[in-house]
Amino acid sequence: MIFELIRLQFLKSVRSTSFAKSLLITIFLAFLALLLLSYILMAGIFLQRILGVLAEGQDPLEVLCSGLIFFFLTEFMYRYFLQNLPVIELESLLHLPIGKRKIIHMLLVRSFISPISVIALLLFLPFGIQVILPTMGMASLIFWIGNILMISWSLHWFMLWFKQRFEDSLIGVFIVFAVLLLGAGSTYMGWFNLGDMVSPFFTWSLTSVVPLLITTILCVWLYYIAYKFYLNNAYLEDLSKEEEVKFANKSFGFFSRFGLAGEMANLEWKLIIRHKKSRTFLMLSAFFLLYGMIFYDNPQYQTEGGGFSFIFIFVGIFITGIFMIQYGQLFLSWNSGNFDFFVNQEDGIAALIRGKYLLLIAVSCLSFLLSVPYVYFGWKFLLIHLATWLFNAGVLIHLIVYLALWKPKPMDLNKGAMFNYEGMGAAQFLMVIPMMLAPYAVYLPFALWVNEYAGLAALATIGIIGILSFKKLSQININRVLSNRYEISSSFRQEL
């Protein structure tokens, strides 16, 4: 029966109208995966030397055992964003005369066959062969690497259950934030060292099989949890619609003050919440609010005399405008499925674009407000975020939209954001250049001739002028869409 299911999946792929395109994409992604895995293998081979440089004078094995928990925290994060769920395939198989239990087992095993499943093996097995095998023997190596693999694979089964259960709710977002904060953040802020607390468990696995047995039981139990969850929820009437999303039907009240554009902004917000790709962009924007933690307290970027590094301008632009940059680069592609509706409405195009502007500025404003706690590192960071937010809202948003309107492409909103290049064109890859250069073109002349704060004042002033000129600047992009609306509409009708 397993071979029959495999055969059906193969026929489904071969008979698809987009088989050639899917094959090319698969080959490209396979090459990319092999390239990334080769880099991971090289990192594993040189891991002993890397640890020797980073922790000079310490035992590399002890350092690694205390740092393994941070690897698993990282794995938790990238599995959350990269790991796919087998629900779509399940929907296409349930009507067949095949036992539901066999289908669930096949889909779960199929989801396990992924490059992500071998990352831990490629990274730590070379280190174990170099360090553990010569000194402690084969048994210790098997116990240690087996323990690591069981934890890694346990995360796979856990994520299959977790994403299906909580991905569309705020609870899932809070849990992921809590893992990030209590894990990496606690050590970074000096609250407690999670690595030192967990290190004895991995050290114990070098001399005993008990940790391996514990993690093996955990892995089997989590597989059973994922299996039972999918089995109990595997009904066509449940899978034909997405899980109810909290706040999906709610609107922002203040948008209603902006007339038809406000209604379009509310509709755009509902689009973001209800679809996987746009929702992922929103969540990534929340995570990138922590981007400043890498730079603001890093001695490498500190300067003498009360000034600050020019790199902080990029960080401020990134933190206060990340959603604007990510979501705005696919400005019209989000509406590729219903663009004709707006074309055929009186003032539909203008209302759609102004509504998108309104939503992007509102989310950027929210990002600025959420970044206010960075004042903990100094008042200058609040000034940096204020100046960069004004520049984003007054200038950069128009630049992003202008570039995004160059030959927009169709996109399926229900697909994930990771390794999904639908809607992407040359403009999306090239727009990073003017986005990087524009703020520095304003900031650097004043910062070099006067001081850094004069550069911030220039950024804020240009941003305020742009905000006051919003109608004229936005009308440029509205007229551009109106003049090319039929060409854009035709491109959106192309098959993905």
Image: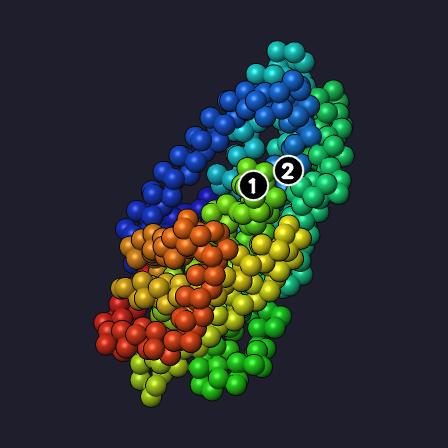
Of circles 1 and 2, the one toward us is 1
**Rendered residue at 42%/39% (across/down):** 33
Label 1: element kind: loop
Picture quadrant of residue 403: bottom left
Name which residue lies at 61% across and 73% down.
Answer: 247
As drawn, 483 above or below 189: below
Q: Is residue 137 above or below residue 334?
A: above
Q: Is 2 displayed left or right of 401 in the figure?
A: right
Q: Which mark is residue 405?
A: none
Q: Which residue is mark 2?
A: 70
- Residue 460 x/y as whole percent: 47, 64
Q: Earlier in the sequence, mark 1 or mark 2?
A: 2
Name the quadrant of the C terminus.
bottom left
Visual colour scheme: rainbow
What x and y, as percent, mark residue 409?
31, 63
Report the residue at 41% width, 35% height from top.
34
**Which amino acid, mark 2?**
Phe
Q: Amino acid at mark 1?
A: Glu
